[in-house]
Amino acid sequence: MDSQVKIGIFFCACGHIMNDYFDMKVLVDYAGRISGVSSVDENRFLCTRSGLDWLKTKISQSGCNRVVIVGCSPYLYEQTFMKVLEEVGLNRYFLAIANIREGCAWVCQEKENLMTRAKQILSSAVKRAGFAKPVEKVQKEINQSALVIGAGLTGIQMALELQQLGIRPILIEKKPQVSRKNPPFFIPTTQKINEREMFSSKIRELRDSEVELLTSTELKKVAGTVGSFQVILDTLGKEREVVVGSIIVSTGSESKVGGRFADLPNSRRIVSLSELKDMFDFERRTLERMLITADKRTKYACFVLGECEAYTKTNTIMALNEAIKLKEKFKAEVMILAKDISVSGIELEALYRQARERGVLFYRYAEESLPEISLEKGVITVSLTDPALHTDQAEKSRPVTIQSDLLILEDEIYPHEGTDLLRDALQVNLNEWGFFQEKNIHLKPNLSNKKGIFFAGSCQGERDIYETLNDVRSVAMGVYSYLSGKSLVLEKKVEINTDKCALCLTCLRSCPHKAIKVGDVGAGQKWGAQVIVEACQGCGICVGECPAKAIEMINYSDNQIFSELSFEG
Amino acid sequence: MMDFTPHIVAFCCENSAYRAVDIAGAKQEGYPSNIQLCRLPCSGKLEINHILRAFEEGADGVFVFACHPDSCKFLKGNVRASKRIEHTASLLEKIGLEKERLRFFHLSELEWAAFLEAVRQGNESIKSLGPSPIKVR
């Protein structure tokens, strides 16, 4: 331990709680006798404003340069105390918290061990503080603009929201134009919202705004990190470099007819769900010809769902919507064949109920017996066994045969073409289905593994309209939180000793955030790995992996961890 | 042997297990007082020498608490930890220490009850193994 180190220990009695459990005098006495400790003080409530002020004056009076707070859990007030340290001119990582409330007083089963455990925790914290080293701060200029990739509904909405927040968006689209006729990918909705109308109103809004829209443009190369990404854009062979503070991916997804039905003969009476939707919007006549004839016979339309491997909510929503429309517009007899209908989403239960009320028939087929489909002389025959339909005598399901005029099959949803190329350019991760992988599906659903790159909409997997709009809002706030200030303050939590570095590239491969680069360290020094501070999240995986022990995590150094392992009591 | 209290070090990831322990603390649910906690930024940070050092210091058992598979904040930290622990267990066997002394648990942030269960059970099993023959320091 450095002889310059003066540790100040500050006890918080937490009102009367600590006194109920411990003999505070003994603890204070013990603390004073630990080597390196220069001052010990006690306060009733450290976390109150007066307590914090008291702490501030005490630290400056006693002249200590490391602080140990003895009190409650670090999750509660660690950040607050760190701020206090900064205010008195110490590094925020010169703090150690001895958690003797949640970690000892409230959990110690054997009351006779209470004191031993508290002393143990205290001495570990003091040692830990003794080994604390300053964590440098790095300031970085930021560029208050964002690149939005993909001008679908998500992308346009994203750009508009960012514009409102005062961040200059640049919207790029691969297609030559953004129009109502070729929406990048429909987002299925319930009956209340017509997404085509919504899309065209958004296009109008976009034209009225000052958002920079670049069509026929692709992203070529990305360098830099959050605050200043240097992006090379390619517009029909012409390259151009822009600097943006953040990148938002909203490339969306594509649909294809899925399942085994790709093998079915080509017939205009067999369509996919998205084709049916397009027919409703643009080719109503074709549908009319198919479903309204002179003979006034009831026409049948049959949906087959659940053939694709993964259950897709998108298909359920679309099928229910289209079934209701067919029923209303053409008075057709509509059947939905499915393994299972799950209606997890906003307003979906109501949609299902509405379909039932209108008289849409639902048939269920078992997992092992898929419905058979045959096409002979233009007549589509679908046969299935519904486990719910039993004959009375033999407990056997009765087969159902449907002669259908229109057969609607489900879509399978794929990530948009070019997602792989984009992944390579951005150096982000894809999940096992080829969609973009979020950082943490529960906690950080729109963050990528790289700081400053966000995902929104169905490029992460299927999304309905509500989820998409939620994504847009949360990403807009995320971007704003990075780019609202003038500069970004980052902490250099990990340090690489290039003298020890053997250039084995283990850290480069193991870093989940691609925060390691290898290159020239400086004039006259040998090559080595370097940490990209902006991308580093401080997980310490590279530290654990480095075979030469060239990497050190400053606030979790070996000595600090060892100091928590010893048993003295 | 009856009144033997083992020393146990529990390495906790601060994104999951350490929070779970904290909740257990706030709920005033007791656990054996011989469990010494060590906070880590991610279980992927845990190095082999940290575990070995704990045994050198006289620990009778080492528990490592990591996030559930596929829910590591840093994508693969828990996978790396589990591999390292496997390796360390083989090292322990080589020097004649029972590999049961080193245990690996998956825990989420809210599973404080599972934490209590794990430490209670683990404590009993270390008790049945007896004191560690190693104590360098």
Image (cartoon, rainbow, N blue to C red):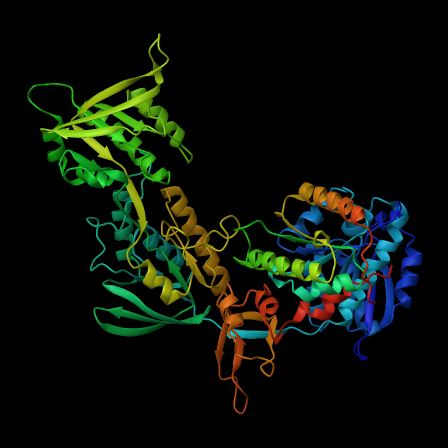
The location of residue A45, given as percent across then percent down, is 80, 54
Query: Farthest residue in the bottom direction?
Result: A524
Q: Position of residue A428 (x, y in %)?
A: 42, 62
Image quarter of the C terminus of chain A? bottom right
Can you say whether A433 is above or below A230 in the image? above
* Residue sitting at x 70%, y 44%: B118
- Residues A74 and A253: in front is A253
x 52%, y 78%: residue: A503
Q: Position of residue A114 (x, y in %)?
A: 87, 50
At 35% from the left and 8% from the top, the residue drawn is A392
In this view of the protein, which residue sits in the foreground, A116 or A41?
A: A116
How many labels were placed on the picture? 0
Image point 67% across, 60% down: which residue? Answer: A79
- Name the image quarter holding residue A553: bottom right
Between residue A443 and residue A400, name the one nearer to us: A400
Residue A55 seen in render? no
Q: Residue furthest top?
A: A393
B111 left or right of A386? right
Q: Position of residue A292 (x, y in %)?
A: 11, 25
Q: Horizontal placement of A139 versus A92: left or right?
A: left
Q: Quadrant of residue A354?
A: top left
Can residue A270 be seen from the camera position used here? Answer: yes
- For the N terminus of chain A, the quadrant is bottom right
Q: Is residue A369 above or below residue B72?
A: above
Q: Is residue A557 left or right of residue A413?
A: right
